[in-house]
Image (spheres, rainbow, N blue to C red):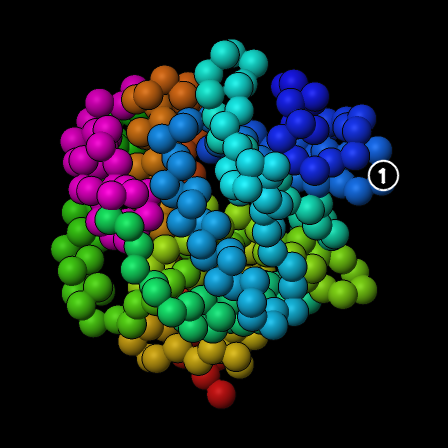
């Protein structure tokens, strides 16, 4: 990474230093420390075709920035060019697209606790309430990754038929058949979910890695709006319920995380009974969308066979937990209502 090019693109005090950070599956992330003591987060998307999606993400962030939220957002800084997006050459000579935002306080939670889960549920509800008030909630239909998670046949051109794509994987046949059976049942319910449940603009990826916290203030910032789009409202809560208790699932202690998160969310943004009953289906929907994404990366040569096997193993583990605990999850969710 050419540090001098970064300093030349944005109004930063030189010299600058870069420290790699843990990024998501789709981006490279660095901390930038400028000579005047200010710190920033540089995010580079290694694909110029992502520009329309990035511009939509910037639009969502700017709409949220004018609301009085009790947490910070990764608001991009304008470059000298006047744009929020800057074309960037990566080490392999390929072109990517970069954004620069202030480095936000707090840290990612390495351990889920009832207190942190409660903070996460409250934050998500406040965020969803704010997202619901964004005036134009239409999502550009040409940006496939922003289509509803239930539209599997349209979301990834490499995987238009997830069931057929599973057959092509170097994975044990019994595992593939198990997932295909769950997928077939899930697909039969998707149309009814979208016609019967409320929809709005959502974050769609609020797992533990996308919240920053500290011991004194609780949640300090919400990160990573790259999947923000219109979808079924109950999906956001379902995604968080999928990830915050993940290390507890199957132990019997998952409810110590699930219940505080769900109650805190419902105290601020009450969901309808039908939405609460749909949470297990929403969790499956999110898992299938994630699996489709991983398979697409494997078919593109961006994931190894070992990585796609891990994704299959994890997906089956998640589906098996839902099969065993779906009724209990719904019963707990219905008790979150005041």
The outermost residue toward the bottom is 338
Q: Is residue 220 left or right of residue 286?
A: right
Q: Is residue 132 above or below residue 182?
A: below
- Is 154 a magenta residue? yes
Q: Nearer the viewer, residue 63 or 11?
A: 11
Which residue is denoted by mark 1 in the rendering?
A: 36
* Quarter where residue 165 is shown: top left
Q: Position of residue 108 (x, y in %)?
A: 67, 48
Seen from this angle, which residue lies furthest top? Answer: 92
Q: Indicate yes or no whether the magenta region holds residue 193.
A: no
- Horizontally, residue 255 falls left or right of residue 53, namely right
Q: Neighbour class for label 1 at 10 Å: few (<14), some, many (≥20)?
A: few
In the image, residue 25 lies at what x, y percent? Answer: 48, 33
Question: Which stretch appears magenta?
Answer: 142-170
Q: Position of residue 216 (x, y in %)?
A: 81, 64
In the drawing, does residue 7 fall left or right of residue 152?
Answer: right
- The residue positioned 17% from the left and 36% from the top of the image is 161
Q: Looking at the picture, does residue 225 appear above or below residue 265?
A: above
Figure quadrant of the N terminus: top right
> Secondary structure beneath disc 1?
loop
Q: Residue at x 67, y 53 (%)?
A: 212
Q: Residue furthest front?
A: 81
Q: Is residue 215 visible?
A: yes
Vertical side of 337 occupied by 118: above or below: above
Q: Position of residue 167 (x, y in %)?
A: 20, 27
Q: Relative to the observer, which residue lies in front, 199 or 186?
A: 199
Q: Is residue 74 left or right of residue 85?
A: right
Q: Residue at x 29, y 33 (%)?
A: 175
Residue at the location (79% across, 60% down)?
215
Whether residue 284 is visible: no
């Amino acid at each position: 990474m050419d540090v001098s090019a970064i300093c030349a693109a944005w109004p930063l005090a030189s010299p600058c230093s870069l420290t790699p950070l843990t990024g998501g599956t789709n981006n490279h992330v660095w901390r930038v420390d400028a000579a005047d003591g200010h710190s920033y987060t540089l995010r580079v998307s290694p694909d110029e075709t992502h520009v329309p999606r990035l511009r939509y993400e910037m639009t969502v962030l700017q709409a949220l920035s004018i609301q009085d939220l009790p947490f910070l957002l990764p608001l991009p800084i304008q470059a000298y060019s006047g744009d929020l997006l800057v074309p960037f050459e990566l080490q392999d000579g390929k072109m990517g697209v970069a954004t620069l935002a202030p480095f936000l306080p707090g840290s990612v939670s390495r351990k889920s606790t009832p207190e942190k889960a409660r903070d996460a549920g409250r934050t998500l509800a406040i965020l969803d309430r704010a997202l619901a008030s964004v005036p134009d909630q239409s999502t550009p239909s040409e940006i496939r990754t922003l289509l509803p998670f239930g539209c599997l046949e349209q979301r990834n051109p490499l995987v238009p038929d997830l069931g057929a794509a599973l057959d092509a994987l170097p994975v044990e046949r019994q595992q593939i058949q198990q997932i295909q059976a769950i997928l077939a049942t899930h697909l039969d319910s998707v149309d009814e979910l979208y016609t019967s449940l409320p929809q709005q603009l959502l974050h769609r990826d609020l797992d533990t890695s996308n919240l920053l916290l500290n011991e004194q203030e609780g949640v300090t910032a919400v990160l990573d709006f790259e999947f923000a789009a219109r979808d079924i409202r109950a999906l956001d809560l379902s995604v968080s319920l999928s990830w915050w208790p993940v290390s507890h699932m199957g132990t019997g202690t998952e409810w110590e995380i699930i219940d505080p998160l769900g109650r805190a969310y419902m105290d601020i943004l009450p969901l309808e009974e039908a939405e609460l009953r749909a949470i297990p289906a929403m969790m499956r929907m999110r898992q299938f969308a994630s699996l489709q994404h991983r398979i697409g990366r494997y078919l593109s040569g961006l994931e190894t066979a070992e990585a796609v096997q891990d994704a299959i193993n994890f997906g089956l583990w998640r589906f098996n937990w839902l099969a065993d605990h779906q009724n209990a999850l719904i019963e707990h969710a219905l008790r979150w209502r005041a």
